[in-house]
Amino acid sequence: MEEKILILDFGSQYTQLIARRIRELNVYSEIVPYNKLPELDDSIKGIILSGSPFSVTDEHALHPDIENIVNKRPVLGICYGAQYIAHHYGGKVMRSEKREYGKATLQTETDNRFWKDVSQESQVWMSHGDTIKDIPEGFEILAKTPNIPVAAYASKAGHFDHPVYCIQFHPEVTHSLEGSN
């Protein structure tokens, strides 16, 4: 049985690139539509919620049933995925006063293992019109940028059976200089 990372596709322009970068790390990845989650067998080691051109606050936003994955596998939310997790668990997501698109300096707030081999200040690529204003209860902020207070956050130890990490930036693009670290 081949171990894999499952990527839930919300229509992001970066979803294929996420899969490619994971495969370049010698890990098999599989892309599935956000609303077609397969049964979580033992081959699935983690799940990524991709970005999306939608806003989680839109009336017709894509709303997956993440209760079927959180607590069952480690989860990484990227951009829309991070915003959706915040929104779903009671955080506040709103239209950014200053849209972030392009290079930004990520400033890590903690020495969380998520940042292993990543500099305390690292260049990342942002592409979002919404921002996470407040994170949900049971989570902690891991990083910010000069323009946004929540660039990365994660579930606190013991809050879920498996960790949930959420990032507003795109580590899969070459402009995120330490994205593969």
Image (cartoon, rainbow, N blue to C red):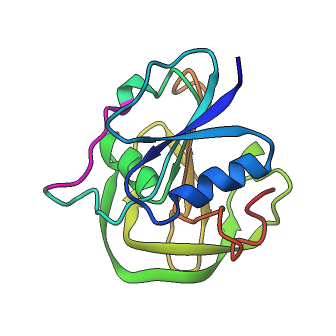
Q: Position of residue 14 (x, y in %)?
A: 52, 63
> Which image quadrant for residue 85?
top left
Q: Residue at x 28, y 62 (%)?
A: 55
Q: Is residue 111 visible?
A: no
Q: Quadrant of the N terminus?
A: top right
From the top left corner, tell me how far across and down residue 6 is, in percent. 55, 36
The relative height of residue 17 versus residue 7 in the rendered view (above or below) is: below
Was residue 64 drawn as part of the magenta stretch in this picture? yes
Return the residue found at the far right. 117
Reply above or below: 113 against 54. above
Give the residue drawn at x 62%, y 15%.
42
Q: Residue furthest left?
A: 59
Tell me what residue is drawn at x 31 percent, y 38 percent. 64
Magenta-drawn segment: 60-66
- The secondary structure that most of the magenta stretch takes on is loop
Which of 6 and 165 lies nearest the eye of the viewer? Answer: 6
| Magenta highlight on residue 140 | no
Q: Residue at x 43, y 24 (%)?
A: 38
Percent coordinates x, y for residue 119 in the rendering = 82, 66
Count the marks: how many?
Answer: 0
Query: Position of 14 compared to 107: left or right?
Result: left
Q: Is residue 8 left or right of residue 88?
A: right
Nearer-the-camera pick, 127 or 165: 127
Rendering quarter of residue 99:
bottom left
Q: Measuring from the top left, give residue 181's x and y in whole percent.
A: 81, 56
Residue 29 found in image quarter: top right
Q: Is residue 48 above or below residue 101?
A: above
Left or right: residue 61 versus residue 117 is: left
Q: Is residue 76 visible?
A: yes
